[in-house]
Image: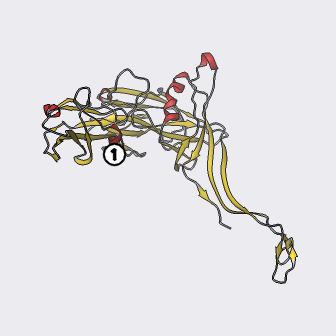
Protein backbone atom coordinates (compact mmCIF):
# COMPACT_ATOMS: atom_id res chain seq x y z
CA UNK A 1 0.00 0.00 0.00
CA UNK A 2 1.38 3.39 -1.00
CA UNK A 3 0.34 6.93 -0.20
CA UNK A 4 0.69 8.62 -3.59
CA UNK A 5 -0.63 12.01 -2.49
CA UNK A 6 -1.08 13.56 0.94
CA UNK A 7 -1.84 17.21 1.86
CA UNK A 8 1.18 19.32 2.65
CA UNK A 9 1.99 20.61 6.11
CA UNK A 10 0.41 24.02 6.81
CA UNK A 11 -2.48 23.44 4.38
CA UNK A 12 -5.84 24.95 5.28
CA UNK A 13 -8.73 22.91 6.68
CA UNK A 14 -10.94 25.08 4.48
CA UNK A 15 -9.40 23.56 1.35
CA UNK A 16 -9.72 19.92 0.23
CA UNK A 17 -7.42 17.64 2.26
CA UNK A 18 -6.99 14.82 -0.24
CA UNK A 19 -5.24 11.52 0.45
CA UNK A 20 -4.66 9.18 -2.52
CA UNK A 21 -3.54 5.55 -1.95
CA UNK A 22 -2.91 2.57 -4.21
CA UNK A 23 -2.33 -1.14 -3.85
CA UNK A 24 -2.19 -3.84 -6.52
CA UNK A 25 -4.81 -5.80 -4.56
CA UNK A 26 -7.35 -3.33 -5.95
CA UNK A 27 -7.11 -4.99 -9.40
CA UNK A 28 -6.74 -8.59 -8.14
CA UNK A 29 -9.88 -10.36 -9.39
CA UNK A 30 -9.60 -12.95 -6.61
CA UNK A 31 -10.21 -10.23 -4.00
CA UNK A 32 -13.93 -9.59 -4.37
CA UNK A 33 -15.74 -6.45 -3.31
CA UNK A 34 -12.42 -4.70 -2.67
CA UNK A 35 -12.47 -1.42 -0.72
CA UNK A 36 -9.87 0.95 0.64
CA UNK A 37 -10.53 1.80 4.31
CA UNK A 38 -9.11 5.05 5.72
CA UNK A 39 -9.05 6.00 9.41
CA UNK A 40 -8.58 9.67 10.31
CA UNK A 41 -6.78 10.51 13.57
CA UNK A 42 -7.01 14.01 15.06
CA UNK A 43 -4.61 14.78 17.91
CA UNK A 44 -3.88 11.04 18.18
CA UNK A 45 -7.54 9.97 18.48
CA UNK A 46 -9.40 8.12 15.73
CA UNK A 47 -12.41 10.28 14.84
CA UNK A 48 -13.61 9.00 11.47
CA UNK A 49 -13.50 5.96 9.18
CA UNK A 50 -14.25 6.09 5.46
CA UNK A 51 -14.56 3.26 2.93
CA UNK A 52 -14.36 3.65 -0.83
CA UNK A 53 -14.22 1.39 -3.87
CA UNK A 54 -11.24 1.84 -6.17
CA UNK A 55 -11.72 4.77 -8.53
CA UNK A 56 -12.91 3.25 -11.86
CA UNK A 57 -10.49 5.41 -13.89
CA UNK A 58 -7.25 4.64 -12.04
CA UNK A 59 -8.03 2.11 -9.25
CA UNK A 60 -6.86 4.53 -6.58
CA UNK A 61 -8.45 5.11 -3.21
CA UNK A 62 -9.30 8.82 -2.93
CA UNK A 63 -10.26 10.39 0.41
CA UNK A 64 -10.98 14.06 1.13
CA UNK A 65 -11.03 14.74 4.89
CA UNK A 66 -11.30 18.54 4.75
CA UNK A 67 -14.93 18.70 5.94
CA UNK A 68 -14.25 16.32 8.84
CA UNK A 69 -11.07 18.02 10.07
CA UNK A 70 -12.81 21.43 10.05
CA UNK A 71 -15.17 20.17 12.75
CA UNK A 72 -12.25 19.75 15.16
CA UNK A 73 -11.17 23.41 15.10
CA UNK A 74 -13.20 25.36 17.66
CA UNK A 75 -12.27 29.05 17.74
CA UNK A 76 -13.21 31.69 20.29
CA UNK A 77 -11.75 35.10 21.10
CA UNK A 78 -8.89 34.71 23.60
CA UNK A 79 -5.31 36.01 23.96
CA UNK A 80 -3.61 32.86 22.64
CA UNK A 81 -5.00 30.37 20.12
CA UNK A 82 -3.39 26.93 20.37
CA UNK A 83 -4.02 23.35 19.18
CA UNK A 84 -7.63 22.79 18.07
CA UNK A 85 -8.11 26.57 17.89
CA UNK A 86 -5.41 27.79 15.49
CA UNK A 87 -4.22 24.49 14.06
CA UNK A 88 -4.82 20.76 14.30
CA UNK A 89 -2.56 17.70 13.90
CA UNK A 90 -3.77 14.75 11.82
CA UNK A 91 -2.67 11.47 10.31
CA UNK A 92 -4.38 8.66 8.37
CA UNK A 93 -4.08 4.87 8.49
CA UNK A 94 -5.16 2.57 5.66
CA UNK A 95 -6.69 -0.90 5.76
CA UNK A 96 -8.08 -3.15 3.03
CA UNK A 97 -11.47 -4.82 2.90
CA UNK A 98 -12.13 -7.75 0.51
CA UNK A 99 -13.77 -11.18 0.55
CA UNK A 100 -15.91 -9.91 3.43
CA UNK A 101 -12.96 -9.24 5.78
CA UNK A 102 -11.14 -6.09 6.90
CA UNK A 103 -7.42 -6.58 7.36
CA UNK A 104 -4.96 -4.82 9.61
CA UNK A 105 -3.31 -1.45 9.03
CA UNK A 106 -1.09 -1.62 5.97
CA UNK A 107 0.01 2.04 5.72
CA UNK A 108 0.23 5.08 8.00
CA UNK A 109 0.75 8.65 6.81
CA UNK A 110 3.02 11.10 8.55
CA UNK A 111 1.39 13.56 10.94
CA UNK A 112 0.53 16.86 9.27
CA UNK A 113 -0.48 20.18 10.83
CA UNK A 114 -3.38 22.00 9.20
CA UNK A 115 -4.41 25.61 9.83
CA UNK A 116 -7.62 27.64 9.72
CA UNK A 117 -6.86 30.25 7.06
CA UNK A 118 -8.87 30.62 3.87
CA UNK A 119 -8.26 31.63 0.28
CA UNK A 120 -10.11 33.86 -2.08
CA UNK A 121 -9.39 33.67 -5.78
CA UNK A 122 -6.36 31.38 -6.07
CA UNK A 123 -4.27 29.50 -8.57
CA UNK A 124 -3.18 26.83 -6.09
CA UNK A 125 -3.69 25.81 -2.47
CA UNK A 126 -1.84 28.05 -0.03
CA UNK A 127 0.17 27.20 3.07
CA UNK A 128 0.67 29.28 6.20
CA UNK A 129 4.31 28.32 6.78
CA UNK A 130 5.53 31.56 5.18
CA UNK A 131 4.03 33.46 8.13
CA UNK A 132 5.88 31.71 10.96
CA UNK A 133 7.12 34.33 13.46
CA UNK A 134 5.36 37.02 11.45
CA UNK A 135 2.33 39.24 11.57
CA UNK A 136 -0.79 37.53 10.20
CA UNK A 137 -2.67 40.63 9.11
CA UNK A 138 -2.90 42.80 6.01
CA UNK A 139 -4.15 45.88 7.87
CA UNK A 140 -2.54 49.29 7.35
CA UNK A 141 0.10 50.41 9.84
CA UNK A 142 -1.79 53.48 11.03
CA UNK A 143 -4.47 52.72 13.64
CA UNK A 144 -7.01 55.09 15.20
CA UNK A 145 -8.16 54.49 18.79
CA UNK A 146 -9.95 56.42 21.49
CA UNK A 147 -8.36 56.77 24.92
CA UNK A 148 -11.13 54.65 26.49
CA UNK A 149 -10.43 51.64 24.22
CA UNK A 150 -9.40 48.69 26.40
CA UNK A 151 -9.13 45.89 23.80
CA UNK A 152 -7.75 46.14 20.28
CA UNK A 153 -6.03 43.13 18.73
CA UNK A 154 -3.24 42.50 16.23
CA UNK A 155 -2.56 38.78 15.50
CA UNK A 156 0.92 37.26 15.43
CA UNK A 157 1.86 33.69 14.42
CA UNK A 158 4.80 32.75 16.64
CA UNK A 159 7.03 29.75 17.05
CA UNK A 160 9.68 31.61 19.04
CA UNK A 161 9.69 34.28 21.74
CA UNK A 162 9.12 37.87 20.63
CA UNK A 163 8.81 41.34 22.18
CA UNK A 164 6.12 43.99 21.83
CA UNK A 165 7.00 47.63 22.66
CA UNK A 166 3.93 49.80 23.34
CA UNK A 167 4.97 53.44 23.74
CA UNK A 168 8.44 52.13 24.60
CA UNK A 169 7.24 49.73 27.33
CA UNK A 170 8.17 46.16 26.45
CA UNK A 171 6.20 42.97 27.01
CA UNK A 172 7.92 39.69 26.21
CA UNK A 173 5.85 36.78 24.91
CA UNK A 174 7.40 33.46 25.87
CA UNK A 175 8.53 30.55 23.72
CA UNK A 176 5.54 28.76 22.21
CA UNK A 177 4.90 25.08 21.71
CA UNK A 178 4.31 25.13 17.96
CA UNK A 179 3.09 27.98 15.78
CA UNK A 180 0.56 29.46 18.15
CA UNK A 181 -1.40 32.62 17.43
CA UNK A 182 -1.02 35.56 19.82
CA UNK A 183 -3.83 38.12 19.63
CA UNK A 184 -1.85 41.07 20.96
CA UNK A 185 -3.88 43.73 22.78
CA UNK A 186 -2.32 47.09 21.84
CA UNK A 187 -4.89 49.30 23.67
CA UNK A 188 -3.25 50.87 26.73
CA UNK A 189 -5.47 53.90 27.39
CA UNK A 190 -2.91 56.58 26.51
CA UNK A 191 -4.09 60.14 25.94
CA UNK A 192 -1.37 60.72 23.32
CA UNK A 193 -0.26 59.09 20.08
CA UNK A 194 2.11 56.16 20.46
CA UNK A 195 3.94 53.45 18.51
CA UNK A 196 3.54 49.68 18.75
CA UNK A 197 6.72 47.86 17.77
CA UNK A 198 6.44 44.08 17.32
CA UNK A 199 9.94 42.66 17.21
CA UNK A 200 10.07 38.99 16.15
CA UNK A 201 12.46 36.62 14.38
CA UNK A 202 10.41 36.90 11.20
CA UNK A 203 10.36 40.68 11.06
CA UNK A 204 9.96 44.01 12.82
CA UNK A 205 6.54 45.69 12.55
CA UNK A 206 5.80 49.25 13.66
CA UNK A 207 2.24 50.56 14.00
CA UNK A 208 1.53 54.23 14.59
CA UNK A 209 -1.50 54.56 16.90
CA UNK A 210 -3.39 57.86 16.66
CA UNK A 211 -5.49 58.61 19.75
CA UNK A 212 -8.67 60.39 18.63
CA UNK A 213 -11.40 62.24 20.49
CA UNK A 214 -14.33 60.12 21.62
CA UNK A 215 -16.62 62.65 19.96
CA UNK A 216 -20.41 62.93 20.12
CA UNK A 217 -21.24 59.32 19.31
CA UNK A 218 -20.89 55.97 21.08
CA UNK A 219 -17.60 54.28 20.26
CA UNK A 220 -17.69 50.59 19.33
CA UNK A 221 -14.92 48.13 18.50
CA UNK A 222 -15.51 45.09 16.28
CA UNK A 223 -13.16 42.14 16.86
CA UNK A 224 -13.19 39.55 14.07
CA UNK A 225 -11.57 36.33 12.91
CA UNK A 226 -9.44 37.33 9.95
CA UNK A 227 -8.45 35.33 6.86
CA UNK A 228 -5.36 33.87 8.59
CA UNK A 229 -7.24 32.53 11.63
CA UNK A 230 -6.30 35.25 14.15
CA UNK A 231 -8.33 38.08 15.66
CA UNK A 232 -7.99 41.77 14.87
CA UNK A 233 -10.06 44.86 15.52
CA UNK A 234 -11.58 47.98 14.00
CA UNK A 235 -12.96 51.17 15.56
CA UNK A 236 -16.49 52.31 14.65
CA UNK A 237 -16.82 55.76 16.22
CA UNK A 238 -19.35 57.64 14.11
CA UNK A 239 -23.16 57.76 14.12
CA UNK A 240 -24.85 54.53 15.22
CA UNK A 241 -28.49 53.50 15.34
CA UNK A 242 -30.16 50.82 17.47
CA UNK A 243 -33.32 48.99 16.37
CA UNK A 244 -35.34 45.88 17.19
CA UNK A 245 -36.78 43.08 15.10
CA UNK A 246 -40.03 41.88 16.66
CA UNK A 247 -42.10 38.73 16.19
CA UNK A 248 -45.51 38.35 17.84
CA UNK A 249 -48.09 35.56 18.01
CA UNK A 250 -51.76 36.31 18.67
CA UNK A 251 -55.27 34.90 18.48
CA UNK A 252 -58.64 36.49 17.64
CA UNK A 253 -61.77 36.64 19.88
CA UNK A 254 -65.25 38.10 19.66
CA UNK A 255 -65.68 41.80 20.53
CA UNK A 256 -68.05 40.95 23.39
CA UNK A 257 -68.26 38.63 26.42
CA UNK A 258 -71.25 36.85 27.97
CA UNK A 259 -71.23 36.50 31.78
CA UNK A 260 -72.82 33.85 33.98
CA UNK A 261 -76.17 35.68 33.94
CA UNK A 262 -76.29 35.78 30.16
CA UNK A 263 -75.50 39.50 29.96
CA UNK A 264 -73.62 40.59 26.85
CA UNK A 265 -70.99 43.36 27.26
CA UNK A 266 -68.30 45.01 25.16
CA UNK A 267 -66.26 46.19 28.14
CA UNK A 268 -65.08 44.84 31.48
CA UNK A 269 -66.84 47.13 33.93
CA UNK A 270 -65.30 45.34 36.93
CA UNK A 271 -61.79 46.57 36.09
CA UNK A 272 -61.31 50.21 35.01
CA UNK A 273 -64.02 49.89 32.31
CA UNK A 274 -61.58 48.28 29.87
CA UNK A 275 -62.78 47.27 26.43
CA UNK A 276 -62.60 43.54 25.79
CA UNK A 277 -59.67 42.48 23.61
CA UNK A 278 -60.47 41.11 20.18
CA UNK A 279 -56.91 40.39 19.12
CA UNK A 280 -54.74 39.09 21.94
CA UNK A 281 -50.94 38.74 21.83
CA UNK A 282 -49.87 35.69 23.80
CA UNK A 283 -46.16 35.58 22.93
CA UNK A 284 -43.58 38.10 21.75
CA UNK A 285 -39.91 37.67 20.77
CA UNK A 286 -37.42 40.33 19.74
CA UNK A 287 -33.83 40.61 18.64
CA UNK A 288 -31.62 43.67 18.86
CA UNK A 289 -29.91 45.28 15.89
CA UNK A 290 -27.28 47.99 15.64
CA UNK A 291 -25.93 49.99 12.71
CA UNK A 292 -22.36 51.22 13.27
CA UNK A 293 -20.14 53.47 11.17
CA UNK A 294 -16.43 54.17 10.82
CA UNK A 295 -14.68 57.45 10.24
CA UNK A 296 -13.37 58.19 6.72
CA UNK A 297 -11.37 55.22 5.41
CA UNK A 298 -8.22 54.98 3.33
CA UNK A 299 -7.99 52.77 0.24
CA UNK A 300 -5.85 50.28 2.17
CA UNK A 301 -8.41 50.08 4.96
CA UNK A 302 -11.16 49.30 2.45
CA UNK A 303 -9.05 46.52 0.92
CA UNK A 304 -8.45 45.01 4.37
CA UNK A 305 -11.94 45.33 5.87
CA UNK A 306 -13.64 42.87 3.54
CA UNK A 307 -12.21 40.29 5.96
CA UNK A 308 -14.45 41.78 8.67
CA UNK A 309 -17.59 41.66 6.52
CA UNK A 310 -17.06 38.01 5.45
CA UNK A 311 -15.84 36.84 8.87
CA UNK A 312 -17.90 34.04 10.48
CA UNK A 313 -16.97 35.14 14.02
CA UNK A 314 -17.39 38.77 15.11
CA UNK A 315 -17.61 40.34 18.57
CA UNK A 316 -18.90 43.82 19.35
CA UNK A 317 -17.12 45.60 22.19
CA UNK A 318 -19.84 47.77 23.70
CA UNK A 319 -19.17 51.14 25.30
CA UNK A 320 -18.92 49.46 28.72
CA UNK A 321 -16.25 47.03 27.46
CA UNK A 322 -18.51 43.96 27.31
CA UNK A 323 -18.02 41.67 24.29
CA UNK A 324 -21.16 40.51 22.46
CA UNK A 325 -21.23 38.01 19.58
CA UNK A 326 -22.89 39.59 16.56
CA UNK A 327 -23.79 38.70 12.99
CA UNK A 328 -23.07 41.13 10.15
CA UNK A 329 -26.19 41.10 7.98
CA UNK A 330 -24.74 43.07 5.04
CA UNK A 331 -24.53 40.83 1.98
CA UNK A 332 -22.41 43.06 -0.27
CA UNK A 333 -19.14 44.91 0.15
CA UNK A 334 -17.78 47.53 -2.25
CA UNK A 335 -14.06 48.20 -2.09
CA UNK A 336 -14.19 52.00 -2.44
CA UNK A 337 -11.26 54.12 -3.57
CA UNK A 338 -10.62 57.84 -3.21
CA UNK A 339 -10.21 58.18 -6.98
CA UNK A 340 -13.67 56.81 -7.73
CA UNK A 341 -15.65 57.46 -4.54
CA UNK A 342 -13.87 60.39 -2.85
CA UNK A 343 -13.76 60.13 0.96
CA UNK A 344 -16.24 57.60 2.32
CA UNK A 345 -16.89 55.58 5.44
CA UNK A 346 -18.20 52.08 6.12
CA UNK A 347 -21.55 51.35 7.78
CA UNK A 348 -22.42 47.84 8.91
CA UNK A 349 -25.70 46.35 10.09
CA UNK A 350 -25.22 44.08 13.10
CA UNK A 351 -27.64 41.65 14.67
CA UNK A 352 -26.90 40.44 18.18
CA UNK A 353 -26.57 36.66 18.17
CA UNK A 354 -29.30 36.21 20.78
CA UNK A 355 -33.09 36.56 20.85
CA UNK A 356 -35.30 37.42 23.81
CA UNK A 357 -38.82 36.68 24.99
CA UNK A 358 -41.22 39.09 26.64
CA UNK A 359 -43.97 38.11 29.09
CA UNK A 360 -46.51 35.44 28.12
CA UNK A 361 -50.18 36.47 28.51
Which class describes the residues within 10 Å of circle 1: few (<14), some (14-19), or many (20+)?
Answer: some
Image quarter (top left, top right, bottom left or bottom right) of the C terminus? bottom right
Q: Residue 290 appears in which quarter of the rendering?
A: top right
Give the left or right position of residue 204, taking residue 223 as reference: left
Give the left or right position of residue 46, taking residue 284 as reference: left
Callout 1: SS: loop
Query: What's the residue at 54%, 41% (across, down)?
Result: 221
Q: Is residue 125 visible?
A: yes
Image quarter (top left, top right, bottom left or bottom right) of the N terminus? top left
State the image coordinates of residue 245 (x, y, percent, origin top left).
65, 49
Residue placed most toward the observer, 47 or 260: 260
Q: Residue furthest top?
A: 339
Q: Residue furthest bottom?
A: 261
State the image coordinates of residue 301 (x, y, percent, origin top left).
52, 26
Query: What's the residue at 40%, 39% (across, down)?
Result: 184
Q: Which residue is mark 1?
A: 72
Is 198 above or below relative to 50? above
Amino acid sequence: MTFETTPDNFYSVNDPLVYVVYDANAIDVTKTNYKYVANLFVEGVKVFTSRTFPNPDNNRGIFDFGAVVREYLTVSLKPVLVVNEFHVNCYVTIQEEYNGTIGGVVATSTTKTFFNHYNGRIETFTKLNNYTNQLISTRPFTIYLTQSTNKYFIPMMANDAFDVYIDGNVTSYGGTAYNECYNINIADGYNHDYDVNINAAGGNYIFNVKVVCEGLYDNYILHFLNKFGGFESMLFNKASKRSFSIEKKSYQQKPYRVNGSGIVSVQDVTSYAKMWQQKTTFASKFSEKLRVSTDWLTDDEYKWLYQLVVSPLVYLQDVDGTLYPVQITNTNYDVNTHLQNKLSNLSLDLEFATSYKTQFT
